[in-house]
Amino acid sequence: MRMVIVAGTPGSGKTAVLIHSLKRLIEKGLKPSVVKIDCLYTDDDKKFAKIGVPTKVGLSMDMCPDHYAIYNIEDMINWAEDNQSDFLVVETAGLCHRCAPYTENCLGVCVIDATSGPNTPLKVGPFLSTADIAVITKGDMISQAEREIFRERVLEVNPQCKVIEANGLSGQGCVELGEEMLNSKEVALDKEKLRHSAPLAVCTLCVGERKVNKKYHRGILRGIDGFQSYKGE
Amino acid sequence: MVDKITVLGGYDKQGNKEPVEEIVIKKGEIFGVVGPTGSGKSSLIGDIEQLAQEDTFSKRKVLVNDEEPSYDDRTNPRKKMVAQLSQNMNFLADMSVGDFLSLHAKCRGASSKCVDAVIRLANTLTGEPIKKEHELTILSGGQSRALMVADIAIISDSPIVLIDEIENAGIRKHDALQILSGHGKIVMVVTHDPVLALMADRRIVMKNGGMQKVINTTTQEKVIAEKLNKVDELMLSLRDRVRNGEIIEDIKLEDVKL
């Protein structure tokens, strides 16, 4: 299964940009599946359902939402395969500037809001610096000069990424993002690793585990089916 | 060199083909964009700003010198052919005017020496002077606008200049237009102001998201434009007098009889 992981702070326009991009891909006859990860509540699934995309919501509740997303990747891919989808899009909750949500072979997309100020790219961590694509949104709300400075700062943090300036309202730039999704690679889950370790805390991922497969995980773990358990000594 | 740009028509808000299928704008030309609010003026300007390739809502296509611009031409600010003054009146960046301008100069590959020149030019357009050490976010609407105009004229200095509603800014709009239009540039002005619209060589009328028709400014309109200019100057001088705390006793209307 090809996999696209979309990260970015809340309100940056992840859902709006994705909806425009997915619409174009559906017009081309492709079949995406979307998983929206959030902590306690989301109604983004209704927005995806409106454009006819099979959508699953994953609420992480007490678990770290990024760890939750990684822990459930296998289930999400199986579900997308059951849907006979061409690719799976995972939209993260996007809560933490230290998030490191991308796996090595997924297409890593960071959505970042230009109105958050030109210092923001310097403040955020791996979800920008290890992304393949940085989508800059809300550029229409600031002057061209500010937009250009913001873009430069993004490239300072991640010189390799492709920058797409997008507008979640008009759909500007979203065609380009859709094209990039088409180029995403197949992910062989068993050997898949995170690009960057997750932030330190108390779970196995938190202490630097980067293996994706379910069997390597310890701690308080919540399955996408809502079942929560403790694994470990 | 940019000698001309071509806008190939797309679709309006209802998905109907636009009545105007093609516009060619040549070097040195000032082109107006008029139409009611919500008619798609800013979207048209947006399409040109990003040199759209049937990848926006309108599905318009923009050619430069009859050719499709490359991806790099469209996105790299050092190569950017378009400078845009949008409707936004405020800066959000949390830094000083001087730092901001030298950062932008760096992005555009311009010398940081031009910072002082930008501030000097901006101060010819606005009332209260802007200083290098001022925080960007505390500038007034007029000051921000003046700074944006000067930044475009000196730092961006692109062959295509797009201006979205300069009239609401509380700055000297004629001077601003003159500074921005420069010699041999392609200029597009979105406006609700008849003074500016009739100053343009041609104007495009927008309706329902689509380009409805192109009007060549008539000789008669050019004459009217000059008269309107005088009305405008009268209003400007009155504005300055009121701003400076004078009491207005009489106005001279002889000069502006239509």
Image (cartoon, rainbow, N blue to C red):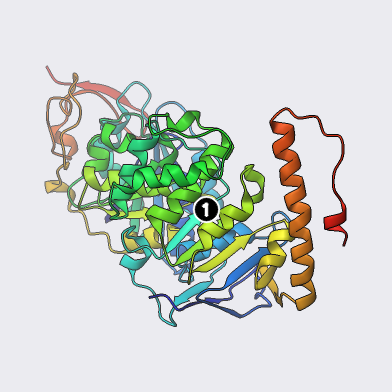
Q: Quadrant of the N terminus of chain A?
A: bottom left
Residue displayed at 34% across by 72% down: B70
Secondary structure beneath dot 1 equals strand
Single out the residue that lies furthest toward the top. A233
Q: Position of residue B17 (x, y in %)?
A: 65, 76
In this rendering, the answer to whether B209 lies above or below A91 is below
* Residue closer to the observer: B249 or B107: B249
In this rendering, the answer to whether A62 lies above or below B97 is above
Left or right side of A183 for A44: right
Left or right side of A225 for A22: right
Residue displayed at 26% across by 35% down: A122
Q: Which residue is mark 1?
A: B85
Q: Quadrant of residue A90?
A: top left
Q: Position of residue B229 (x, y in %)?
A: 73, 58
For the residue carrying disc 1, how many other residues have a C-alpha within 10 Å: few (<14), some (14-19), or many (20+)? many
Residue displayed at 30% across by 36% down: A69
Single out the residue that lies furthest toward the bottom. B66
Is residue B208 among the parts visible in the rendering?
A: no
* Chain under disc 1: B
* Residue closer to the observer: A130 or B95: B95
In this rendering, the answer to whether B56 lies above or below A222 is below
Amino acid at pointer 1 = Leu
Q: Quadrant of the C terminus of chain A?
A: top left
* Residue closer to the observer: B63 or A173: B63
Left or right side of A137 for A121: left
Residue displayed at 43% across by 42% down: B119
Q: Position of residue B105 (x, y in %)?
A: 32, 49
